[in-house]
Amino acid sequence: MRVLVMTVVHHPEDARILHRQIRGLVDAGHQVVQAAPFSAFGVQPRPWVSGVDLPRAGGRRRAGAIRFARTVLRDQGGKADVVLLHDPELLLAVGDVRKHVPVVWDVHEDTAAALGMKAWLPGPLRPAVRLAVRLAESAAERRLHLILAEPSYAGRFRREHLVVPNYPYVPDSVAPPAADRVVYVGSLSAARGAAELVATARLLAPHGVRAELVGPADGQVRGLIEAAAAEGVLDWAGYQSNDEALRRLDGALAGLTLLHDQPNYRHSLPTKVVEYMARGVPVITTPLPRATRLVETHRCGLVVPWQDPEAVAKSVLLLREDRPRREALGRNGHAAALEHYSWPVAARRFIAQLEAWAGAAG
């Protein structure tokens, strides 16, 4: 099976796109053409895919990228057995391709809710844009195949669709949590708790506990993080490939996820919580419902109040002083991830569904 995978928004090495779905397809013996903004992000296609460079769509400047993607989709789509889209923007580029090849939209997030958090979108326009997104989703459901990353997304659609959770690969064994550093892995923004991460790092530094942030920062918080790193308050690694970023978790005292109470986060599974569990790292999370349920069900971490760096720092120091507890939390999380949240199980359902759609079209 030949699969065309496209994005104009996400990093070409996005964990779900490259390290899970594309890697799973290649490991299963399928050919993948990855069309993504390689040049815009300064990376090269992996040797095990055929790469096609696309412009990046960002902020209000998206029309050019969509037009270019439409051309690539028209040229490459006819050579594919199935097309997999990862951005709602690409719904505008499909055109007549869907008449000749199955086109699948992988729904990553609640797009309408996410737009409410975008600084570049003026407030008065947001209700109209959210309505337009809902209408586009309804049209996509009628014309395309859908895959959902979260069960909670099902309420936005009329029919039942396959849910392919964003689970990580879980190693068979992990290092026990150590006592000198905490780690955050993921994109950095105000809503993702960047200010609280910096404040927590300041509180922990006098106690000899180092905070390490791994991931790109948006324009609103980049200066804050750069200043803290320059002062020596924390270590900021910037963007790292998913495999490298996850290796930095090994042996950490705790993994932090300090997301704010936003609609786009409220009913979603915070992927980083499962990634911390998979590496045997105790989780410290704000009380988002699904994150809290994971931590409490599997006894693998601590829940702290919203926007409370003092509570976060206190929890970290509590774990540092209680080695048996932190090691138990790490073991519990790793065992739960290995049994319930490992990508290969989800990958089999994902690949089987693409094969079925391609076979039906053939």
Image: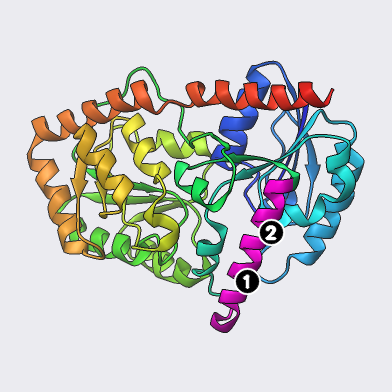
Question: Residue placed at 32% from the left, 46% from the top?
Answer: 290
Q: Give the x, y percent position of residue 212.
A: 34, 50
244 with respect to 192 (left or right): right
Quadrant occupied by the C terminus: top right
The label on residue 129 is 1
Residue segment shown in magenta: 122-142
Most frequent secondary structure within the magenta stretch: helix
Element marked by disc 2: helix
- Residue drawn at x 45%, y 33% is 167
Picture quadrant of residue 24: top right
| Up-down relation of residue 74 to residue 357 (above or below) | below
Which quadrant holds residue 76?
top right
User: Residue 156: x, y in percent?
Assistant: 54, 53
Q: Secondary structure at mark 1?
A: helix
Which labelled disc corresponds to residue 136?
A: 2
Residue 39 falls within the magenta-colored stretch: no
Number of the label disc, if any, that sits on residue 311:
none
Name the residue rendered at 16%, 29% in the picture: 328
Query: Residue at point 24% right, 60% down?
Result: 200
Nearer to us in this view, 204 or 324: 324
Camera sees residue 163: yes
Task: Indicate whether residue 138 is drawn in magenta.
Answer: yes
Q: Quadrant of the N terminus?
A: top right
Which amino acid, mark 2?
Answer: Ala
Whole-angstrom CA distance, mark 2 to mark 1, is: 10 Å
First in residue order: circle 2 vs circle 1: 1
Label 1 environment density (alpha carbons within 10 Å; few <14, some 14–19, many ≥20): some
